Image (tube, rainbow, N blue to C red):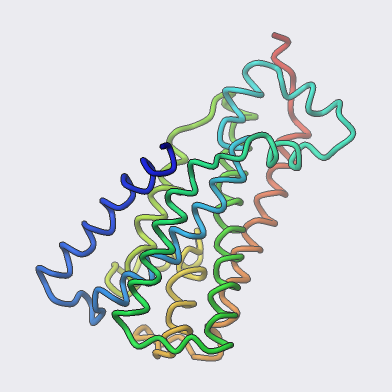
Amino acid sequence: MLILGQCAATSIEILGVYALFSRFGSVGGWSFGEAALFYALVNITFSLADMLTRGFEVFGTDFVRTGAFDRVLLRPRAAALQLAGHEVRLSRLGRLIQGVVVLAIASRLVPIDWDGPAIAMAIWAVTGGVALFFGMLVLQATMAFWTVESLEIANVLTYGGVQAAQYPLNIYATWFRRLLTFGVPLACVAYYPVLAILKRPDPLGAPDWLLPFTPLAGFAFLALSFLAWRAGVARYASTGS
């Protein structure tokens, strides 16, 4: 029931996207079918990352504040690995299923040639996206070393990022495009890979040869997040409770 509930709840989002495009026909030169591809890709990646990172999401309240992180550090396994396996939330399968259904719909609405390179690009983009969202949640957990809480404000990056990446990059203002490309590189795991899948030139001028490499930004972001995590672990002091 939780899976069905999550699937139904997230379906409201794609209905909102459809309502927008049905009102204006196209937005920034993109059709609803193409926007649905953005939506499907980012929601599939986020659902996979969200299923595997529950330990990081509740790290402040369930581990730092209670002192339970002491036990994690005493075990002969990496703390990050233990937190990643803390709890697998199968309810997130609802968002994953919904994303796959939207991907199937998008494939019917736009002429996507699902040849070998396109399929490989989609898989590569999903892995890069999972790494990026994983990194965001690791950063959220790292802040708990200083705040002793799981900061809900960090959801601006995760859930807010999912919302922003559901639309093509060129409809946003310049400063926001730069933020989504160089700050939190959501465009590198959604916008540019979709361009490569559609075999469509970038209206913003990015060269075609660069598009297949952009998901690497997700792994770079994850690596930087774990560097911050290591700094946080080094300064960790037990609450003693």
Side (left or right) of 34 relative to 77: left
Residue 201 against residue 139 in the figure, above or below: below
Image-quadrant location for residue 174: bottom left
At x 44% / y 56%, what residue is drawn?
97
Say left or right for 121 vs 32: right
Q: Nearer the viewer, residue 104 or 42?
A: 104
Q: Residue at x 86, y 29 (%)?
A: 75
- Give the residue furthest to the top: 241
As drawn, 53 above or below 126 = above
Residue 132 percent coordinates (x, y):
57, 58
Q: Quadrant of residue 32?
A: bottom left
Relative image position of residue 122 (x, y in whole percent): 53, 75
**Toward the viewer: 51 or 136?**
51
- Tell me the quadrant of the picture where the C terminus can be found: top right
Q: Residue furthest front?
A: 1
Above or below, comparing residue 215 to residue 119 in the picture: above
| Numbered disc total | 0
Q: Position of residue 158 (x, y in %)?
A: 46, 48
Q: Is residue 127 left or right of residue 186?
A: right
Q: Nearer the viewer, residue 163 or 94?
A: 94
- Name above or below for residue 74 compared with residue 233: above
Look at the image and tell me in which quarter the N terminus lies. top left
State the residue lying farthest toward the left: 23
Q: Residue at x 57, y 82 (%)?
A: 212
Query: Residue visible at 59% across and 35% down?
Result: 143
